[in-house]
Image (cartoon, rainbow, N blue to C red):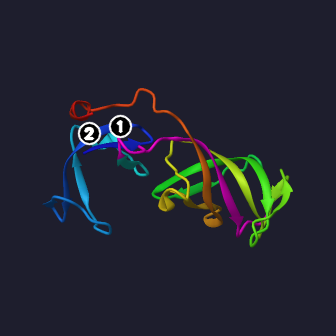
Amino acid sequence: MVVTFGPSGLTTEVKSVEMHHESLLEALPGDNVGFNVKNVAVKDLKRGFVASNSKDDPAKEAANFTSQVIIMNHPGQIGNGYAPVLDCHTCHIAVKFAEILTKIDRRSGKELEKEPKFLKNGDAGFVKMIPTKPMVVETFAAYPPLGRFAVRDMRQTVAVGVIKSVEKKDPSGAKVTKSAAKKK
């Protein structure tokens, strides 16, 4: 099988799938496994990278994304330009709240206000976010573990949310190992 690691776009072939250092023919859902890949240095992979099937919707870097956010614990007001740390799957990256699109009712989901100046404790809204470093996220509807996040600031969780839409970057100049190029 050929896998692609996002957000770098590194593509390589899987040599073996292992559980407790014993090779497996297949892994089932819930199995805690590791896999060996060909011709990839440890420094090429970082925490937060996502491995995916290169033929079926490979993981790509997010240029920006729109998410539904609920503010839980923030002493002041959150406006456009706010840049906290976003914890999404194993990724911890600062994101910029580029634009607060709407303020919504937490329970019904009805729109209360278009383009509000700020959000405060207890508010919910749709926010366009831009990551400061390359990261992979997906919509909550398509891939739930990659589509939910916590917003952290001042050493505490400030907000939580789910991703509604993602605008992806095309990986340019991504490394493809020789074995992966043969398999394609």
Asked whether, in this view, residue 160 is left or right of residue 71, the answer is left
Can residue 124 be seen? yes
Q: Compared to 114, does 123 lie above or below? A: below
Residue 89 at x, y = what percent? 47, 59
Which element type, helix, strand or loop, lies under badge 2?
A: loop
- In reply to whether residue 17 is colored magenta, the answer given is no
Q: Residues within 10 Å of mark 2 (few under 14, many from 20)?
A: some
| Quarter of the image that includes the C terminus | top left
Q: Residues within 10 Å of mark 1 (few under 14, many from 20)?
A: many
Q: Single out the mark in the foreground, 1 or 2.
A: 1
Name the residue furthest top: 173
Q: Which residue is mark 1?
A: 10
Q: Compared to 98, does 170 lie above or below? A: above
| Marker disc for residue 167 | none
Count up the numbered dots: 2
Are the residues at dot 1 and dot 2 in contact (C-beta closer than 8 Å)?
Answer: yes
Q: Which residue is mark 2?
A: 40
| Front position in the image: 140 or 156 | 140
Q: Amino acid at mark 2?
A: Val
Name the residue furthest left: 22
Residue sitting at 79 percent across and 55 percent down? 102
Residue sitting at 50 percent across and 61 percent down? 144
Residue 171 at x, y = what percent? 46, 33
| Quarter of the image that includes the N terminus | top left
Q: Amino acid at mark 1?
A: Leu
Q: Compared to 75, does 184 lie above or below? A: above
Name the residue furthest bottom: 107
Which stretch is magenta?
53-79
Which element type, helix, strand or loop, lies under badge 1?
A: strand
Asked whether, in this view, residue 17 is left or right of residue 99, the answer is left
Residue 100 at x, y = what percent? 76, 51
- In reply to whether residue 63 is colored magenta, the answer given is yes
